[in-house]
C-alpha cells in the first residue's frame, strides 16, 4: 500500500484515546512509508492523524470541498491540498489516490464516506481493503448491526468478511496488506440464503 484514505471526525470526541490513537495511526503510516489521503482539515481527529504523519515526515494529501474550506479549516502544512467543488468529487478523488481505506471514530460524514467506499468494493468497482480501527469499542454496535444484516438475509457473509476490523494499528495494517477481495457477486437470491 502506497497510500490510505482515512475517514474520521472533525472533532475529538469525548475521550482522549480517540485523539491519541488517530495521532499514533498517522505516525505508524509514516513509519511504514504509507501516505495519507484525508479530508484536508486541521481540526479534530482529521488534524490529529495528519499531524502524526507530518511529524514523521510522511506524505499527506488533503481533499477539501471549497464550501468547507472555512468551516473545517484547511491544514497549512500538507504535502498537497486539493480543492474540489462537491462532496462526491471529494470521495472520488480520495478513492483515486488511495490503495485502501480506514475509518476512525466520527459522525454521519465519516459513516457516509466509509459506507460508500465499502459499497463500491461490494459492487466490484474497486478491490481495495476497507478497514475500521475500532478504538475503545467505538464501532462495536455497528459491527453487531452488520451481523444482523447478514442474519436477516440482506448481506452475504462473503461481503461482511470484506470488512477488516481491529483495535490494534499494526494488526489492522497487516490485515490490509494481506487482503484479498472476494470474487463472489453481490446479489442475493432466496435460494442462496
Image (spheres, rainbow, N blue to C red):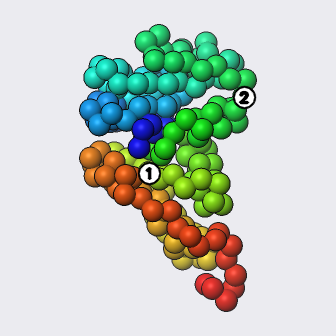
Residue 157 placement (x, y as % from top left) = 51, 73
Rendered image: mark on residue 34: none
Label 1 residue SS = strand
Residue situated furthest bottom in the rendering: 191
Residue 131's label in the rendered image is 1
Horizontal side of residue 26 vs 104, given as left or right = left
Residue at the image point whose x is 47% and y is 53% from the top: 129
Instruction: Give coordinates of residue 100: x percent, y percent.
Output: 48, 46
Work out whether residue 65 can be spotted. Answer: yes
Foreground residue among 13 and 172 = 172
Front in this rendered view, residue 124 or 117 = 124
Vertical placement of 98 versus 166: above or below? above
Residue 184 sits in which quadrant?
Answer: bottom right
109 with respect to 44 (left or right)? right
Residue 58: x and y in percent read 35, 24
Q: Is residue 39 left or right of residue 30?
A: right
Q: Which residue is mark 2?
A: 86
Label 2: element kind: loop
Q: CA distance from mark 1 to mark 2?
A: 24 Å
For image coordinates 41% across by 24% down, the residue present is 59
Disc 1 or 2, which lies upstream in sequence? 2
| Residue at 68 percent of width and 73 percent of height | 187
Rendering quarter of residue 72: top right
Amino acid at each position: 500500500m502506497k497510500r490510505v484514505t482515512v475517514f474520521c471526525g472533525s472533532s475529538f470526541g469525548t475521550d482522549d484515546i480517540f485523539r491519541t490513537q488517530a495521532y499514533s495511526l498517522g505516525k505508524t503510516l509514516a513509519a511504514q512509508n504509507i501516505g495519507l489521503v484525508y479530508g484536508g482539515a486541521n481540526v479534530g481527529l482529521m488534524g490529529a492523524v495528519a499531524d502524526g504523519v507530518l511529524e514523521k515526515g510522511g506524505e499527506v494529501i488533503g481533499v477539501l470541498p471549497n464550501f468547507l474550506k472555512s468551516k473545517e479549516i484547511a491544514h497549512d502544512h500538507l504535502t498537497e491540498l486539493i480543492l474540489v467543488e462537491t462532496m462526491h468529487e471529494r470521495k472520488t478523488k480520495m478513492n483515486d489516490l488511495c490503495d485502501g481505506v480506514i475509518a476512525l471514530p466520527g459522525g454521519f460524514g465519516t459513516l457516509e464516506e466509509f459506507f460508500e467506499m465499502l459499497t463500491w468494493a461490494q459492487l466490484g468497482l474497486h478491490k481495495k481493503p476497507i478497514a475500521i480501527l475500532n478504538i475503545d469499542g467505538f464501532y462495536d454496535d455497528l459491527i453487531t448491526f452488520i451481523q444482523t444484516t447478514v442474519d436477516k438475509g440482506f448481506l452475504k457473509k462473503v461481503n461482511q468478511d470484506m470488512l477488516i476490523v481491529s483495535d490494534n494499528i499494526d494488526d489492522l495494517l497487516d490485515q490490509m496488506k494481506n487482503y484479498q477481495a472476494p470474487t463472489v457477486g453481490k446479489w442475493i437470491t432466496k435460494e442462496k440464503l
